[in-house]
Amino acid sequence: MIKVENIRKRFGFKDVLCGVDFEVCNGETIVIIGSSGVGKSILLKNIAGLVKPDTGSVKIDAVDIVKCSPLELRETQKKIGYVFQEAALFDFLDIFDNVAFGLRTLTSLDEEEIKQRVVHCLSMVGLENIEHLKPSVLSGGMKKRVGLARAIAYQPKYILYDEPTTGLDPIMSDVISNLIINLKERLNITSIVVTHDMKSACKIADRIIMLYKGNIIFSGTPKETQNSKNEYVRQFVEGSSHGPILIDR
Ligand SMILES: Nc1ncnc2c1ncn2[C@@H]1O[C@H](COP(=O)(O)OP(=O)(O)OP(=O)(O)O)[C@@H](O)[C@H]1O
Ligand SMILES: [Mg+2]
């Protein structure tokens, strides 16, 4: 399981995370919502060990990745797939090698098995016959889906998705939502998903948490989120420019 305890992160004079606590049980899908710039991506990067918090701990299967040795951190990171907000593909590699990257470095599959897995994962995100292309010729939505294929290819225990449906058309967004559900049901993958897409959030989440001013101000099921009387949650769910969130800016 993932246990985040009292994480604080400051950049310059800005306190981005001010003591964030939450747990994700095995097989659970947690969705993180919150305004742009509130610290969702930084929180995910802290959980993946890509950014170190100033204080607090992040336990992945009981290993505190904030305090552990670099070797333990690397071993623990092998359990985590990460879908970056900006896709973050390797520009100098073609799509095949991008998706195969984790398979070659983290598994003992042979080239034929890798080929089958790459083609299968690309087809799961609706992409075919693009293996030979370089990332620079793909559309934004296609890059995003290659990033997804890369993260799921080696079937990590945990997947952290940073806005997996942003920039995708509504039909493809639903394909990706179904893919996240499918991975949970078939492989018991535990996920943390950052998204602004409330339709997707309500479809995939066991629990939705909302980040505001460095803290978690709400946690509930999709139904509780949609019916919440919390005025911050309500404003976000309704996508209204009127409410306390705007006043605070
Ligand atoms: N390396 C860094 N140095 C300085 N400030 C940073 C750094 N990384 C993030 N920040 C700041 O931390 C805050 C939170 O950034 P973050 O990317 O986590 O936002 P977000 O909630 O993911 O927003 P969005 O929904 O737009 O992606 C922002 O004010 C950002 O400028
Ligand atoms: Mg972000």
Image (tube, helix red, strand yellow):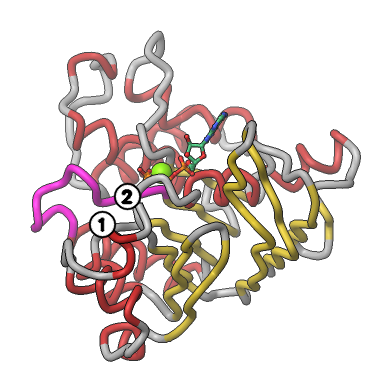
235 on left or right of 184:
left
The relative height of residue 4 versus residue 78 in the rendered view (above or below) is below
Instruction: Give the tally of numbered discs.
Output: 2
Find out whether the residues at labels 1 and 2 contact each other: C-beta distance under 8 Å: yes
- Mark 1 and mark 2: Cα distance apart in space: 7 Å
Residue 1 within the segment the image draws in magenta: no
- Who's the residue at 32% across and 80% down the image? 231
Residue 150 position within the rendered picture, expressed as x and y whole percent measured from the top left: 42, 38
What residue is pinned by disc 1? 176
The relative height of residue 16 versus residue 99 in the rendered view (above or below) is below
Q: How crowded is the residue under tag 1: few (<14 C-alpha within 10 Å), some, or many (20+)?
A: many
Residue 200 image label: none
Question: Quarter of the image containing the N terminus?
Answer: bottom right
Q: Is mark 1 within 8 Å of ligand 2?
A: no
What residue is pinned by disc 2? 164
Q: How crowded is the residue under tag 2: few (<14 C-alpha within 10 Å), some, or many (20+)?
A: many
Kind of residue at disc 2: Pro
217 on left or right of 240:
right
- Who's the residue at 79% across and 57% down the image? 57
Q: Is mark 2 within 8 Å of ligand 2?
A: no
> Within the image, what quadrant is residue 24 found in?
bottom right
Give the magenta range.
162-173
